[in-house]
Amino acid sequence: MSAGPAGDVTRSFDIPDSETGDRTASRPPTSPLRRFLTTEDGVNIEAVYDPGSVVYNASHPLPDDTGKPLGSSPAIVVAHGFTGGVDRPHVRRVVASLTRYGSVVTFSFRGHGRSGGHSTVGDREVLDLAAAVRWARDLGHERVVTVGFSMGGSVVLRHAALPDAGVDAVVSVSAPARWYYRGTAPMRRLHWLVTRPAGRLVGRYGFGIRIHHRDWDPVPPSPVESVPLIAPTPLLIVHGDSDGYFPVDHPRMLAEAADGHAELWLEEGMGHAEHATTGELLDRVGDWVLGTGG
């Protein structure tokens, strides 16, 4: 399950009966758009573009009806957690909050939703994120920020460490620091789901996820190994002190590996990933995204 370089989107095409929008490359669409993107390794990934809401304030201006170029607003690319997808309610809630701060690209990782392929649980998913980032650029956005949750949090860290990542800031929420962690009951259950034939059947028919049966070969760089390579790109690490999957030593390891480059938010009482992320926290993340634009 090794991942190659980030690569470009080789092609994209409309999903039948999808939303339509302005498809000119010099100006982002002004209405929702749904596409299939093709990754470097040939997997079709379902993606959705939601244009940003009309927002303007003195400290962080966003496009409004006064003629400010739409391309100056950031594109926020959201990478969901394991079992998520573009149409999952908890993912759509995140999108609804973040469109107040920029346009949002969401996508279903391979093996999830209507995307093709099989989940490699954080390995080749880097290619899925690369396709979504490239699409955001093709739509005309000058700034692209990735925001990942849990598995998606590990993917945005690994992707940002690549020399051709092409992102302007990174937010990782509830991400693991290291692979093969089994120190909590939820993670032991997840490892059973991923590594056992019976577990993969439960994943397919219980959660709608197609999981690859092969072990990683080679093992990809871990998030904590990737973090030192992200600088000077701004990095925000968000984690709850009540996370049932990954205890607080994980975000602290990530922040330590950043050697002062990353900002760490340890959120009191917060659980895990999208389900535990409040609207207030998403607003603070949105403000942070705008603040990295200079």
Image (cartoon, grey):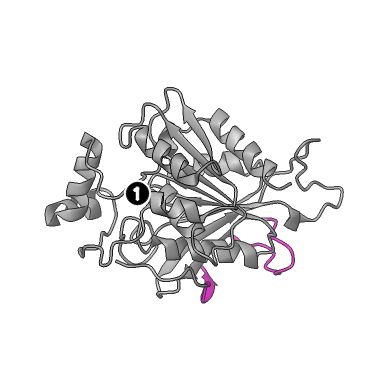
Task: Report if residue 27 lies within the magenta region.
Answer: yes
Q: Would residue 38 appear left or right of 98 to someone viewing this image?
A: left
Please identify the residue farthest to the top as the structure is shown. Answer: 269
Q: Secondary structure at mark 1?
A: loop
What are the residue bounds of the magenta stretch?
8-30
Residue at left offset 49%, top offset 56%: 229
Looking at the picture, how far across and down is residue 64, in whole percent? 80, 46
> Percent from the top left, x then y, of residue 261?
56, 44
Residue 213: image quadrant is bottom left
Q: Nearer the viewer, residue 184 or 52?
A: 184
- Which residue is disc 1 drawn over? 82
**Observer-nearest of 127 and 32:** 127
Q: Residue 46, how many percent across, how many down? A: 46, 62
Is residue 188 visible in the rendered image? The answer is: yes
Q: Quadrant of residue 43?
A: bottom left
Where does residue 51 sit, x and y in percent of width and height? Answer: 65, 52
Residue 200 visible: no
Q: Which of 70 and 224 lies nearest the eye of the viewer? A: 224
